[in-house]
Amino acid sequence: MIGILGGTFNPIHNGHLHLAERLQQTMGFEAIRFMPAAIPALKDIPNVSAEQRADMVKLAIFDYPTFEIDTRELERAGPSYSIDSLISLRKELGDKVSICWLIGSDAFARLNTWHRWNELLDHCHFVVVKRPRSEELNWSSEVDALIVAHQTNDVNALKNSASGKILIQEIAALDISSTEIREHIASKTNVSDVMPSSVINYIQQHQLYQLINGYL
Ligand code: ATP
Ligand code: MG
């Protein structure tokens, strides 16, 4: 059973690592792959390249033997659609391997906006982790219906099949976001307790996130 954690990782932080660590402990993945997304040019933070986001992921996961980086979305031209990554992963891993897409509740609540979203469960399971302050989210009725049709509480059901199930894991997520971290760095607020020191050093070395949204 392989876990995939997709995200923009702009930058990666302890919330991502904690989520992966806790799910690794409770579910026993052979590996968890961190998969940075390419960001449309207009949404990108000026002066932080995709390669730098990937470098920071590599530094953050260095000490974890079962965590890996998967750069397929950065090697592909155009927007990063998860459905394309899943189809490509299936070609690599075959149809039998259990693939679990690990995701925070804020992102899962908007799943119905993803490209070809109703095909995703043909290729993977979803493991959803409740993120702090996500109670107010409006889960769309389409996502609700998907949960009703596919939810299980049995980890073995995910281990023993390749795709098609949704597991909601009640682990305590950390209240950390990349958005807040970018603001903190720009305002010179200390971030040493929310991200690995190797990533902080990299950010300092390359002078990243010094300006909020690059404009202030
Ligand atoms: P931003 O604030 O820029 O959106 P982010 O902190 O949400 O950044 P992403 O790269 O967007 O980070 O998140 C990638 C995945 O990790 C998403 O599924 C998201 O829900 C999840 N995630 C991010 N931070 C946490 C956290 N603190 N706890 C649990 N899951 C998280
Ligand atoms: Mg986010």
Image (cartoon, grey):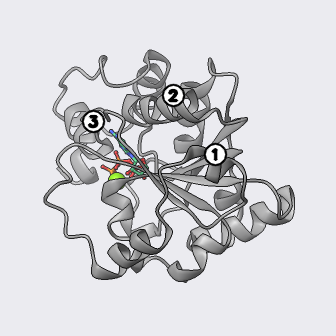
Which one is in front, 175 or 58?
A: 175
Measure the C-alpha gap from mark 3 to mark 2.
Answer: 15 Å
Q: Is mark 3 within 8 Å of ligand 1?
A: yes
Front one among 210 and 1: 1
* Mark in front: 3 vs 2: 2
Amino acid type at mark 3: Ile
As drawn, the label of residue 176 is 3
- Which structural element holds mark 1? helix
First in sequence, mark 1 or 3: give its number: 1
Helix, strand or loop at label 2? It is helix
Answer left or right for 16 relative to 194: right
User: Residue at position x 68%, y 47% from top?
Assistant: 159
Q: Find residue 47 and report its horizontal and vertical position in percent.
A: 42, 49
Give the residue number, with chain letter if any, for mark 2.
21
Q: How far across and how far down the image is residue 101, in percent?
A: 56, 55
Residue type of the residue flagged with mark 1: Asn
The location of residue 213, given as percent across then percent down, is: 26, 53
The residue that mark 1 highlights is 156
